[in-house]
Amino acid sequence: MSMRQQVLVLYLATSALDADVVGWSLYDGTGLTAPTAGDSDKPPYTSGVHALEDGWRLFQAAQLIPPYPGHEYDVSFLKHEFFFEKLADTGVA
Amino acid sequence: MTNTKLLSSVQMAHFVARGSLRLDAVVPPELNVVGIETLRAGVPGVPYGSSVPDAYPEGSFVRLLLQIPEVAGALRSLVGPEPSVDHHAVHIREPREGQAQPLHGDAIIDVRTDAFDVQLMYYPQDVTLDMGGTLSVPGSHLRRTNESDTGRYQNLRGQSRLVCPAGTVVFLHHGLWHGGRRNDSDAVRYMFKIRFNPTVRQLRLWDTSDLGDPRVAAELSTTFPWYEQATGRLEIYNRVLLWRSLTGDDSFDLDHWVSRVSNRPERQAV
Protein backbone atom coordinates (compact mmCIF):
# COMPACT_ATOMS: atom_id res chain seq x y z
CA MET A 1 0.00 0.00 0.00
CA SER A 2 1.42 3.39 -1.01
CA MET A 3 -0.32 6.47 0.39
CA ARG A 4 -0.25 9.92 -1.23
CA GLN A 5 -1.84 13.27 -0.44
CA GLN A 6 -4.89 14.56 -2.29
CA VAL A 7 -5.60 18.26 -1.87
CA LEU A 8 -8.98 19.96 -2.19
CA VAL A 9 -9.23 23.75 -2.21
CA LEU A 10 -12.65 25.23 -1.57
CA TYR A 11 -13.61 28.89 -1.97
CA LEU A 12 -16.59 29.80 0.18
CA ALA A 13 -19.16 32.60 0.05
CA THR A 14 -18.16 33.97 3.49
CA SER A 15 -15.39 33.29 6.01
CA ALA A 16 -17.56 30.64 7.70
CA LEU A 17 -16.64 27.02 7.06
CA ASP A 18 -20.30 26.10 6.62
CA ALA A 19 -20.84 28.72 3.88
CA ASP A 20 -21.67 27.74 0.30
CA VAL A 21 -18.91 26.69 -2.11
CA VAL A 22 -18.31 29.26 -4.88
CA GLY A 23 -15.15 27.72 -6.37
CA TRP A 24 -13.00 24.60 -6.11
CA SER A 25 -9.75 22.95 -7.19
CA LEU A 26 -8.42 19.42 -6.80
CA TYR A 27 -4.83 18.16 -6.90
CA ASP A 28 -4.18 14.43 -6.81
CA GLY A 29 -0.83 13.15 -5.51
CA THR A 30 -1.69 9.57 -6.44
CA GLY A 31 -1.44 10.46 -10.12
CA LEU A 32 -4.59 8.47 -10.78
CA THR A 33 -6.58 11.51 -11.87
CA ALA A 34 -5.59 14.80 -13.56
CA PRO A 35 -8.02 17.55 -12.52
CA THR A 36 -7.55 20.77 -14.50
CA ALA A 37 -9.07 24.19 -15.18
CA GLY A 38 -12.63 24.17 -16.42
CA ASP A 39 -13.20 20.42 -16.07
CA SER A 40 -16.50 20.64 -14.19
CA ASP A 41 -19.44 22.95 -13.59
CA LYS A 42 -20.65 21.10 -10.48
CA PRO A 43 -18.97 21.68 -7.09
CA PRO A 44 -17.89 18.44 -5.36
CA TYR A 45 -19.39 19.69 -2.08
CA THR A 46 -21.99 22.26 -1.13
CA SER A 47 -20.00 23.74 1.80
CA GLY A 48 -16.75 23.34 3.73
CA VAL A 49 -18.51 21.31 6.41
CA HIS A 50 -19.93 19.05 3.71
CA ALA A 51 -16.32 18.20 2.72
CA LEU A 52 -15.48 17.43 6.38
CA GLU A 53 -18.44 15.07 6.51
CA ASP A 54 -16.91 13.16 3.61
CA GLY A 55 -13.60 12.68 5.41
CA TRP A 56 -11.53 15.63 4.13
CA ARG A 57 -9.27 17.13 6.81
CA LEU A 58 -8.92 20.93 6.93
CA PHE A 59 -5.28 22.04 7.19
CA GLN A 60 -5.34 25.73 6.22
CA ALA A 61 -7.87 28.57 6.22
CA ALA A 62 -7.37 32.04 4.79
CA GLN A 63 -6.72 34.76 7.37
CA LEU A 64 -9.07 37.69 7.66
CA ILE A 65 -6.97 40.66 6.62
CA PRO A 66 -8.37 44.19 6.71
CA PRO A 67 -8.18 46.10 3.41
CA TYR A 68 -5.15 48.29 2.89
CA PRO A 69 -6.05 51.97 3.45
CA GLY A 70 -7.18 53.48 0.17
CA HIS A 71 -8.00 50.09 -1.33
CA GLU A 72 -11.19 49.31 0.55
CA TYR A 73 -13.28 49.01 -2.63
CA ASP A 74 -10.78 47.06 -4.73
CA VAL A 75 -11.66 43.55 -5.81
CA SER A 76 -8.96 40.96 -6.36
CA PHE A 77 -8.41 37.32 -5.34
CA LEU A 78 -11.08 35.22 -3.67
CA LYS A 79 -10.83 35.79 0.07
CA HIS A 80 -12.28 32.71 1.74
CA GLU A 81 -9.92 29.92 0.74
CA PHE A 82 -9.81 26.59 2.62
CA PHE A 83 -7.32 23.77 2.03
CA PHE A 84 -8.27 20.15 2.81
CA GLU A 85 -6.41 16.88 2.47
CA LYS A 86 -7.04 13.19 2.25
CA LEU A 87 -4.54 10.37 2.07
CA ALA A 88 -5.30 7.93 -0.72
CA ASP A 89 -3.82 4.64 -1.86
CA THR A 90 -2.02 4.75 -5.19
CA GLY A 91 -2.88 1.09 -5.70
CA VAL A 92 0.83 0.33 -6.09
CA ALA A 93 2.28 -2.23 -3.63
CA MET B 1 -17.56 53.93 -43.52
CA THR B 2 -18.32 50.25 -43.10
CA ASN B 3 -21.95 49.41 -42.44
CA THR B 4 -22.23 48.96 -38.69
CA LYS B 5 -24.82 47.76 -36.21
CA LEU B 6 -24.00 49.67 -33.06
CA LEU B 7 -24.68 48.07 -29.71
CA SER B 8 -27.64 49.23 -27.65
CA SER B 9 -27.28 50.54 -24.10
CA VAL B 10 -28.72 47.24 -22.83
CA GLN B 11 -25.99 45.35 -24.70
CA MET B 12 -23.31 47.72 -23.39
CA ALA B 13 -24.60 47.24 -19.84
CA HIS B 14 -24.43 43.49 -20.43
CA PHE B 15 -20.76 43.89 -21.42
CA VAL B 16 -19.98 46.11 -18.44
CA ALA B 17 -21.53 43.55 -16.06
CA ARG B 18 -20.12 40.38 -17.61
CA GLY B 19 -16.90 41.62 -19.20
CA SER B 20 -17.84 39.93 -22.47
CA LEU B 21 -20.28 40.07 -25.36
CA ARG B 22 -21.05 37.07 -27.55
CA LEU B 23 -22.27 37.29 -31.15
CA ASP B 24 -23.35 33.82 -32.24
CA ALA B 25 -22.77 32.73 -35.86
CA VAL B 26 -22.36 36.27 -37.21
CA VAL B 27 -19.71 35.15 -39.68
CA PRO B 28 -21.27 33.44 -42.74
CA PRO B 29 -20.31 29.82 -43.56
CA GLU B 30 -18.40 30.68 -46.74
CA LEU B 31 -16.20 33.13 -44.83
CA ASN B 32 -15.59 30.55 -42.07
CA VAL B 33 -14.12 28.23 -44.73
CA VAL B 34 -11.68 30.98 -45.70
CA GLY B 35 -11.11 31.64 -41.99
CA ILE B 36 -9.94 28.11 -41.24
CA GLU B 37 -7.65 28.14 -44.28
CA THR B 38 -6.23 31.49 -43.15
CA LEU B 39 -5.61 30.31 -39.60
CA ARG B 40 -3.96 27.09 -40.82
CA ALA B 41 -1.61 29.14 -42.98
CA GLY B 42 -0.91 31.58 -40.12
CA VAL B 43 -1.46 35.31 -39.87
CA PRO B 44 1.82 37.27 -39.86
CA GLY B 45 2.34 39.60 -36.93
CA VAL B 46 1.93 43.36 -37.21
CA PRO B 47 3.67 46.17 -35.31
CA TYR B 48 2.04 47.21 -32.03
CA GLY B 49 -0.31 50.13 -32.59
CA SER B 50 -0.96 49.44 -36.28
CA SER B 51 -4.12 50.86 -37.79
CA VAL B 52 -6.63 48.34 -39.09
CA PRO B 53 -6.00 49.30 -42.76
CA ASP B 54 -2.24 48.92 -42.26
CA ALA B 55 -2.57 45.60 -40.44
CA TYR B 56 -5.20 43.98 -42.63
CA PRO B 57 -5.32 44.95 -46.33
CA GLU B 58 -8.67 45.47 -48.03
CA GLY B 59 -10.06 42.12 -49.17
CA SER B 60 -8.02 40.05 -46.71
CA PHE B 61 -9.86 37.57 -44.51
CA VAL B 62 -9.33 39.55 -41.29
CA ARG B 63 -10.50 42.78 -42.93
CA LEU B 64 -13.64 41.01 -44.17
CA LEU B 65 -14.21 39.69 -40.65
CA LEU B 66 -13.97 43.21 -39.22
CA GLN B 67 -16.37 44.55 -41.87
CA ILE B 68 -19.25 42.29 -40.85
CA PRO B 69 -21.85 44.83 -39.63
CA GLU B 70 -22.38 43.20 -36.21
CA VAL B 71 -18.62 42.90 -35.63
CA ALA B 72 -17.84 46.41 -36.86
CA GLY B 73 -20.68 47.84 -34.76
CA ALA B 74 -19.66 46.07 -31.58
CA LEU B 75 -16.02 47.11 -32.01
CA ARG B 76 -16.97 50.74 -32.62
CA SER B 77 -19.36 50.75 -29.66
CA LEU B 78 -16.74 49.32 -27.29
CA VAL B 79 -13.53 51.10 -28.29
CA GLY B 80 -14.64 53.69 -30.85
CA PRO B 81 -13.61 54.54 -34.39
CA GLU B 82 -10.15 53.73 -35.68
CA PRO B 83 -8.88 51.59 -32.81
CA SER B 84 -5.30 50.44 -33.08
CA VAL B 85 -4.26 46.82 -33.25
CA ASP B 86 -2.29 45.83 -30.16
CA HIS B 87 -1.49 42.33 -31.43
CA HIS B 88 -3.17 39.24 -32.77
CA ALA B 89 -2.62 35.51 -32.38
CA VAL B 90 -3.82 32.26 -33.88
CA HIS B 91 -4.60 29.65 -31.21
CA ILE B 92 -4.66 26.01 -32.28
CA ARG B 93 -5.55 23.25 -29.82
CA GLU B 94 -4.48 19.83 -31.01
CA PRO B 95 -6.71 16.77 -30.42
CA ARG B 96 -6.30 15.15 -26.99
CA GLU B 97 -3.98 17.93 -25.91
CA GLY B 98 -3.39 17.15 -22.27
CA GLN B 99 -3.23 20.46 -20.46
CA ALA B 100 -5.61 23.35 -19.97
CA GLN B 101 -4.22 26.87 -19.71
CA PRO B 102 -4.24 28.23 -16.17
CA LEU B 103 -6.97 30.78 -15.59
CA HIS B 104 -5.43 34.15 -16.43
CA GLY B 105 -5.89 37.71 -17.58
CA ASP B 106 -3.89 38.68 -20.68
CA ALA B 107 -0.86 41.00 -20.67
CA ILE B 108 -0.18 42.42 -17.17
CA ILE B 109 -2.36 43.79 -14.40
CA ASP B 110 -4.26 46.72 -15.90
CA VAL B 111 -6.22 48.87 -13.48
CA ARG B 112 -7.52 51.61 -15.76
CA THR B 113 -10.99 52.64 -14.59
CA ASP B 114 -11.82 55.03 -17.44
CA ALA B 115 -10.56 53.05 -20.45
CA PHE B 116 -10.31 49.45 -21.53
CA ASP B 117 -9.04 47.31 -24.39
CA VAL B 118 -11.11 44.57 -25.99
CA GLN B 119 -10.07 41.22 -27.32
CA LEU B 120 -11.96 39.86 -30.30
CA MET B 121 -12.10 36.07 -30.32
CA TYR B 122 -13.29 34.36 -33.49
CA TYR B 123 -14.31 30.68 -33.71
CA PRO B 124 -14.53 29.48 -37.34
CA GLN B 125 -15.98 26.04 -36.57
CA ASP B 126 -18.66 24.57 -34.29
CA VAL B 127 -17.17 24.21 -30.81
CA THR B 128 -18.47 21.33 -28.68
CA LEU B 129 -17.88 20.93 -24.95
CA ASP B 130 -15.20 18.26 -25.35
CA MET B 131 -13.23 20.40 -27.84
CA GLY B 132 -12.13 22.59 -24.94
CA GLY B 133 -13.67 25.93 -25.91
CA THR B 134 -12.45 28.94 -23.95
CA LEU B 135 -13.15 28.96 -20.24
CA SER B 136 -14.09 32.40 -18.93
CA VAL B 137 -15.44 33.77 -15.68
CA PRO B 138 -18.31 36.25 -16.08
CA GLY B 139 -17.85 39.40 -14.05
CA SER B 140 -14.15 38.85 -13.28
CA HIS B 141 -12.84 41.72 -15.43
CA LEU B 142 -12.63 44.32 -12.66
CA ARG B 143 -10.57 42.09 -10.34
CA ARG B 144 -7.09 43.45 -9.74
CA THR B 145 -4.95 40.38 -10.37
CA ASN B 146 -1.86 39.83 -12.46
CA GLU B 147 -1.88 37.41 -15.43
CA SER B 148 -1.80 33.77 -14.28
CA ASP B 149 -1.71 34.44 -10.52
CA THR B 150 -5.28 33.11 -10.63
CA GLY B 151 -4.04 29.74 -11.93
CA ARG B 152 -4.91 28.06 -8.62
CA TYR B 153 -8.62 28.40 -9.43
CA GLN B 154 -9.81 25.44 -11.49
CA ASN B 155 -13.56 25.91 -11.45
CA LEU B 156 -15.85 28.70 -10.31
CA ARG B 157 -19.63 28.48 -10.03
CA GLY B 158 -21.30 30.08 -13.03
CA GLN B 159 -18.17 29.89 -15.18
CA SER B 160 -18.59 29.81 -18.95
CA ARG B 161 -17.22 26.87 -20.93
CA LEU B 162 -17.70 28.06 -24.48
CA VAL B 163 -19.87 25.94 -26.73
CA CYS B 164 -20.83 27.81 -29.89
CA PRO B 165 -21.82 27.53 -33.53
CA ALA B 166 -19.31 28.22 -36.30
CA GLY B 167 -18.74 31.90 -37.01
CA THR B 168 -19.15 33.07 -33.43
CA VAL B 169 -17.30 36.18 -32.29
CA VAL B 170 -16.82 37.05 -28.62
CA PHE B 171 -15.50 40.37 -27.33
CA LEU B 172 -13.72 40.30 -23.98
CA HIS B 173 -12.79 43.17 -21.65
CA HIS B 174 -9.00 43.06 -21.20
CA GLY B 175 -9.26 42.02 -17.55
CA LEU B 176 -11.54 39.01 -17.94
CA TRP B 177 -10.22 35.78 -16.42
CA HIS B 178 -10.10 33.11 -19.12
CA GLY B 179 -8.10 30.18 -20.48
CA GLY B 180 -8.08 27.60 -23.25
CA ARG B 181 -9.51 24.34 -21.95
CA ARG B 182 -8.11 20.88 -22.55
CA ASN B 183 -9.13 19.50 -25.95
CA ASP B 184 -10.54 16.05 -25.17
CA SER B 185 -11.89 15.53 -28.72
CA ASP B 186 -10.37 14.15 -31.91
CA ALA B 187 -10.75 17.48 -33.72
CA VAL B 188 -8.29 20.36 -34.06
CA ARG B 189 -9.78 23.54 -32.57
CA TYR B 190 -9.04 26.96 -34.06
CA MET B 191 -9.42 30.41 -32.57
CA PHE B 192 -8.18 33.81 -33.73
CA LYS B 193 -7.71 36.68 -31.33
CA ILE B 194 -7.08 40.38 -31.89
CA ARG B 195 -6.51 42.88 -29.09
CA PHE B 196 -7.65 46.41 -29.87
CA ASN B 197 -6.63 49.61 -28.08
CA PRO B 198 -8.99 52.62 -28.14
CA THR B 199 -7.68 55.83 -29.68
CA VAL B 200 -10.56 58.01 -28.44
CA ARG B 201 -12.17 58.55 -25.06
CA GLN B 202 -14.70 55.77 -24.45
CA LEU B 203 -17.71 57.99 -23.90
CA ARG B 204 -21.19 57.14 -25.27
CA LEU B 205 -19.80 55.41 -28.37
CA TRP B 206 -22.82 53.12 -28.82
CA ASP B 207 -26.47 53.75 -29.74
CA THR B 208 -27.60 55.51 -26.56
CA SER B 209 -31.25 55.97 -27.57
CA ASP B 210 -32.28 53.36 -24.97
CA LEU B 211 -30.14 54.70 -22.12
CA GLY B 212 -33.18 55.00 -19.85
CA ASP B 213 -34.42 51.47 -20.52
CA PRO B 214 -34.94 49.70 -17.17
CA ARG B 215 -33.11 46.67 -18.60
CA VAL B 216 -29.88 48.72 -18.44
CA ALA B 217 -29.97 48.83 -14.63
CA ALA B 218 -31.13 45.21 -14.56
CA GLU B 219 -28.09 44.12 -16.60
CA LEU B 220 -25.73 46.19 -14.46
CA SER B 221 -27.17 44.65 -11.28
CA THR B 222 -26.36 41.10 -12.35
CA THR B 223 -24.47 39.09 -9.78
CA PHE B 224 -22.67 35.84 -10.51
CA PRO B 225 -22.72 32.60 -8.52
CA TRP B 226 -18.98 32.67 -7.82
CA TYR B 227 -19.07 36.06 -6.10
CA GLU B 228 -18.54 35.97 -2.36
CA GLN B 229 -21.39 37.66 -0.54
CA ALA B 230 -19.48 40.76 0.60
CA THR B 231 -17.15 41.18 -2.37
CA GLY B 232 -20.11 40.85 -4.70
CA ARG B 233 -21.32 44.20 -3.40
CA LEU B 234 -17.95 45.76 -4.21
CA GLU B 235 -18.30 44.41 -7.74
CA ILE B 236 -21.50 46.42 -8.16
CA TYR B 237 -19.76 49.49 -6.73
CA ASN B 238 -16.93 49.24 -9.26
CA ARG B 239 -19.36 48.54 -12.08
CA VAL B 240 -21.28 51.73 -11.27
CA LEU B 241 -18.03 53.70 -11.54
CA LEU B 242 -17.31 52.18 -14.96
CA TRP B 243 -20.83 52.97 -16.20
CA ARG B 244 -20.48 56.54 -14.94
CA SER B 245 -17.24 56.85 -16.90
CA LEU B 246 -18.75 55.42 -20.10
CA THR B 247 -21.89 57.58 -19.96
CA GLY B 248 -20.48 60.74 -18.37
CA ASP B 249 -23.34 60.58 -15.87
CA ASP B 250 -21.83 61.04 -12.42
CA SER B 251 -25.21 60.71 -10.75
CA PHE B 252 -25.84 57.13 -11.92
CA ASP B 253 -26.08 54.57 -9.14
CA LEU B 254 -27.53 51.17 -8.32
CA ASP B 255 -29.23 50.74 -4.94
CA HIS B 256 -27.35 53.77 -3.57
CA TRP B 257 -24.06 51.81 -3.25
CA VAL B 258 -21.73 54.59 -4.43
CA SER B 259 -23.83 57.56 -3.28
CA ARG B 260 -24.02 56.30 0.31
CA VAL B 261 -20.27 55.97 0.87
CA SER B 262 -19.35 59.18 -0.93
CA ASN B 263 -21.84 61.38 0.93
CA ARG B 264 -19.91 64.15 2.67
CA PRO B 265 -22.30 67.13 3.01
CA GLU B 266 -20.67 70.56 3.31
CA ARG B 267 -23.82 72.54 3.96
CA GLN B 268 -23.81 74.08 7.44
CA ALA B 269 -26.75 73.33 9.69
CA VAL B 270 -28.85 76.35 10.64
Image (spheres, rainbow, N blue to C red):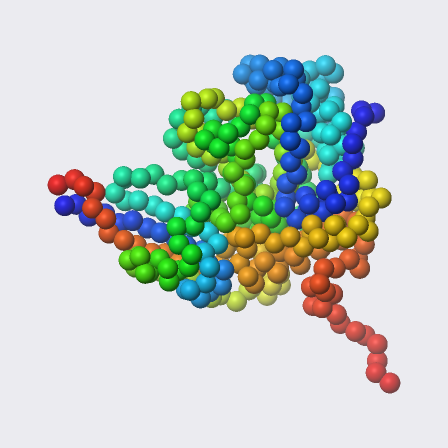
- From the viewer's side, name the closer residue of A7 and B86: A7
Picture coordinates of residue B45, whole percent (x, y): 60, 22
Residue at the bottom extreme? B270
Residue at 49%, 42% in the rendered image? B103
Q: Is residue B93 left or right of residue B114?
A: left
Q: Could you tell me if residue B88 is visible in this image?
A: no
Q: Is residue B178 left or right of residue B81?
A: left
Picture coordinates of residue B169, whole percent (x, y): 64, 30
Which image quadrant: the C terminus of chain B? Answer: bottom right
Q: Is residue B135 above or below residue B43?
A: below
Q: Is residue B137 left or right of residue B94?
A: right
Picture coordinates of residue B180, whole percent (x, y): 49, 34
Picture coordinates of residue A72, whole percent (x, y): 60, 63
Q: Quadrant of residue A47?
A: bottom left
Residue at the right extreme? B270
Q: Is residue B83 above or below residue A28?
A: above
Residue at 75%, 72% in the rendered image? B264
Residue at 50%, 24% in the rendered image? B189
